[in-house]
Amino acid sequence: MRSVRWWMIGFWIVLAGLGVNTEATAQQKCVNAVGEAAILNNDQPSARLEAIARAKWAAIEKTVAIDVKASSFVSNFTLVEDVMKTKVGGSVKSFKVLGQSRQGEVMSVTINACIEPAKAQEAISSELALNNGIALFIPARKPSARGGDEFEETNILSEKLIGKLTDQNFKVIDAAPSNPSDAVAIERMARSGSTMAVRSMLYKYLSNVVIVGKIDYTISTKKGEDIGYGLSMPFNNVTVRLTYRMLARNNRTGNMEILTADAVSGRGLANNVEDAAARGMEDLVEKLSPKVLDKAHKFIQGNVKKVRVKVNGVKDMDTNIEVKGALQKTVWVTDVEENEMGEFTVSYPENSLYLANSLRQQGAFTLVNFTPYSLTFNYRP
């Protein structure tokens, strides 16, 4: 009996172990992905490493619900791999190279990578999300020329607001969902205050700010309606109302915060109801955009951090002035303090990865060393 009892205990231990392994495996997704890199100075090993880094990112992007590719933010994947290895490296559980080939000066590598999607999504969205990236979704109920009403997910207000934000160098993503159930979920969130749909949008579009709302309209006075004293209304008078929230993710706590919430109305007059509603939305934009821009700028200013930038090759005052000017002209740099010849403290609201990439793209700066709070470049004008 004792031997049977011990055999049964051993049997259940094995089953428990198999259950744990099965659960761990179920959390992973294995996909094939391809990465390419240019071969510079016939340095195939370096090109292979960069191609593998690109393939890893391609595998991660296949397994998480992110529409904005990392490649649209950062071109130097070797730099990304170096910066992200402590975060995203934990979500790439394993990978193996399936094959590689060279065509001219391009190295191509195919890998099979096993990814833990939840960790990958959290790592990418937290590390690559832009403070100046805004996801926007404001559907509108409007009168239809065919009679009745229709809903527009892209409309006059959303388009004009996107234009005003992009004029201020914000990166705006129109988050009009392709799936009707997404629109319903976001509308429910806007009414109830639930942040689940908002958090999903932030993950999906790699932004730290989201604007969600809903536009409705009423015909205040119809054309031809008696307005007293024997007079009739010469135009349709339409009132358009917007209820919206602007939310942001606190980079220090990770929690959602409401930057502003409001209900705004606009009026429009026209011969037909559709044109009157359109003019009402244009009136709304003029009232809404100053508030949104003000809150967005304040949010960015609240996230500014200091980054030390050391530039080698600065040997005279003229070159020092050139470098400082280049730093000051970089998008979203808010201040540049000169510490000594060739060394500066730069105030920057985004991940310093983007500062490094912006300077590299200017052509005169070559990145030598990177840490989140310190960058070192060689400078050759």
Image: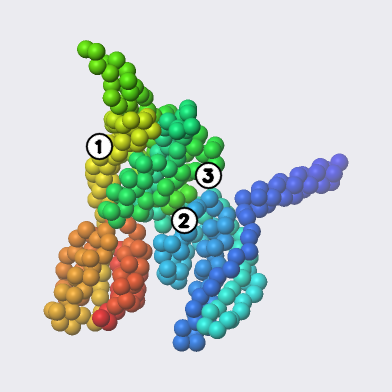
Residue 369 screen position, x and y as percent: 35, 73
Residue displayed at 76% across by 44% down: 12
| Earlier-in-chain disc, 3 versus 2 | 2
In the rendered image, residue 361, in percent from the top left (x then y), is placed at 34, 71
> Which residue occupies 31% across, 36% down?
279
Q: Name the side, left or right, on which 353 lies relative to 176.
A: left
Q: Which mark is residue 178?
A: 3
Q: Which residue is drawn at 49% across and 78% down?
A: 38
| Kind of residue at disc 1 | Lys
Q: What element carries label 3?
A: loop
Q: Distance between the residues labelled 1 and 2?
A: 30 Å
Please name the amino acid that badge 3 sits on: Ser
Which numbered disc flags the more N-terminal residue, 3 or 1?
A: 3
Task: Give the alpha-carbon distance from disc 3 to disc 2, as whole Å.
Answer: 15 Å
Residue 287 circle label: 1
Q: How many other residues sit within 10 Å of disc 2, few (<14), some (14-19) or many (≥20)?
A: some
Which residue occupies the foreground of this view, 118 or 181?
181
Mark number displayed over residue 155: none
Q: Whole-Å distance between the Cαs marked 3 and 1?
A: 29 Å
Residue 206 screen position, x and y as percent:
43, 52
- Left or right: residue 170 versus residue 104 is left
Q: Mark 2 points at which residue?
A: 68
Q: Name the secondary structure under disc 1.
A: helix
The answer to whether residue 126 shows anywhere in this view is no
